[in-house]
Amino acid sequence: MAWDYLASHATIHDIMNDSGLAKLGDSLVNLCFSLAKSVVIGCPTGEKVKDSVLARAIRSSPIYASIGHRTDPGSAADAYEAVMAWLWLNRKTTIDSVVDSLTKSLLAEDMEREKSAKRNDESAVRAFQSLLEQVSKQLPICGYTQQDGQDESYPVSKP
C-alpha cells in the first residue's frame, strides 16, 4: 500500500516511541472504541478513550517494558495507540477485529450513561487489556514477528 513506509519499524521500542504512529493510532483507537461502545449501548456515540484507560491497559502488559523509560499516562496511551496503528498499517489487525474484541469485552451494564465513570473506565481498561493480549503476539521481537499463529518467526522490514 502507499502507506507501508509509515510502519517499517523493526522493534517494539521503535513502534512505541513513534509520535507519528501515536497520532494515527489515536484516531484509530477512538473510532474502534466509539463503534464498540455504540454496539454495546445500542445507539451511536462519539466517545473517546481516556489516556488513563489506555495507560492502565498497556502498563499491565509485558510489552510496556519495551518503551524504555517511565511514562506519564499521556505517553503510555500514545504507546498503546502507536502499537495499534503499527498493527493496522501492517495488516496484522483490522478495524472489524478490534471492534469485535472490544465489543465482546465491554459490559453493557457498565457502559450505560447513568453508571459511574469509574465502572465505565474499569470495563474499558479490561477490554483494552484483552485486545492487547490478543494482538501483541503480532509485534516484532528483536526485528522478527510471528505471523498467522506459526511457531516460526519472519523478519520485519527495516526502515
Image (tube, helix red, strand yellow):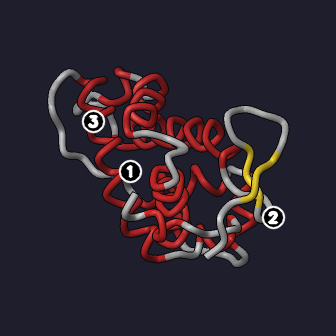
The foreground one among 43 and 139 is 139
Q: Quadrant of the C terminus?
A: bottom right
Which of the two labelled residues, at mark 2 and mark 3, occupies the earlier sequence position?
A: 3
What is the spatial separation of the Cα atoms under label 2 and label 3, in whole angstroms?
Answer: 34 Å
The foreground one among 47 and 9 is 9
- What percent of the width, then of the height, locates residue 140? 71, 57
For badge 1, the amino acid type reads: Val
Q: Quadrant of the N terminus?
A: bottom left
CA neighbours of label 1 inside 10 A, class few (<14), some (14 to 19), many (20+):
many
Tag nearer the camera, 2 or 3 = 2
**Quadrant of res 26:** bottom left
What SS does tag 3 mark? helix
What SS does tag 2 mark? loop
**Quadrant of res 22:** bottom left
- What percent of the width, then of the height, locates residue 25? 41, 59
Residue furthest to the right in view is: 151
Label 1 belongs to which residue?
A: 29
Which of the two labelled residues, at mark 1 and mark 3, occupies the earlier sequence position?
A: 1
For badge 2, the amino acid type reads: Cys
For badge 3, the amino acid type reads: Leu
Residue 25 in the image: above or below residue 113: below
Residue 108 in the image: above or below residue 69: above
Q: Which mark is residue 142?
A: 2
Q: Residue at x 61, y 41 (%)?
A: 135
- What percent of the width, then of the height, locates residue 37? 30, 33
Which of the two labelled residues, at mark 1 and mark 2, occupies the earlier sequence position?
A: 1
Contact (Cβ within 8 Å) of mark 1 with mark 2: no
Residue furthest to the left in view is: 44
CA neighbours of label 3 inside 10 A, class few (<14), some (14 to 19), many (20+):
many
Label 3 belongs to which residue?
A: 35
